[in-house]
Image (cartoon, grey):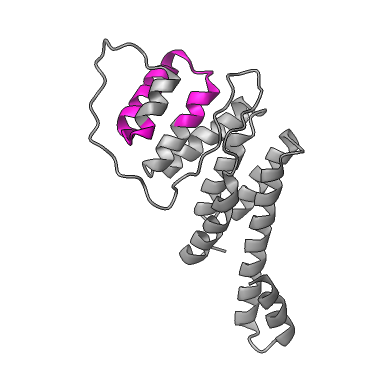
Amino acid sequence: MALHPAAARAILAILMTGLCRVGVAQEAVATPPSPAEAPLSVTAPLPVATATPLPADSPVSSPKAIQKLASEGKLQEALMAADQYLETNSQDGTVLFLKAKILTKLGKTDDAITVLEGMTERFPEMVTPYNNLAALYSAKGRLDDARKTLEMALMVQPNYATAYENLADLYLALARQSYAHALKLDPNNKTLKAKADKLN
């Protein structure tokens, strides 16, 4: 059943309050540590400054330089710098994750999903990509995919409190949606209404 756009936005709003709450924690993995999780603007792309193409002979940017460009709102430049860097450092999970966040801010959600999905396969020990991937799935109404992704995060890191919270929020959103649908089919059912009211 297709998810109504308003319902998708409501579910996203619930998830986004928890999906990226971790502000400074980083993961210890074999690849370079993933960056701290940060909120993803999946509902509205940030303003984009006019990009200046990188000179062909310019040195490959560092992760810090790419982050600086992104922080300054120079998203197109940051994306080009990330791609350039990844040509010679394809195993850098930090920059791949940063690229996914830049793509999301640019409104290129499908591309961001592709990057994050690839990360969960190449770097399954990193939990932050699962979190952000679940947020993007939710924004597209792919709630079951979001649920599975959060469950995978918990398999990777069983003590990941944020993923438990996000999963609870997702189940709550699904419950509200189901009760609302049931009430449309049986509007006079007082038991249903009482249960629905408890969740609101």
Residue at the farthest bottom position? 188
Residue 92, how many percent across, how many down?
A: 52, 19
User: What range of the chain is rendered magenta?
Assistant: 70-98
Q: Nearer the viewer, residue 38 or 143?
A: 38
- Look at the picture and state if 126 lies above or below 13: above
Residue 184, how many percent across, how many down?
A: 60, 81
State left or right for residue 20 relative to residue 85.
Answer: right
Q: Residue at x 44, y 47 (%)?
A: 41
Q: Residue at x 36, y 14 (%)?
A: 60
Q: Is residue 97 magenta?
A: yes
Image quadrant in which the C terminus is located: bottom right
Residue 137, how many percent across, how many down?
A: 54, 48
Q: Nearer the viewer, residue 36 or 138?
A: 36
Q: Residue at x 67, y 28 (%)?
A: 125
Residue 3, how many percent across, how many down?
A: 53, 63
Q: Main secondary structure of the magenta part?
A: helix
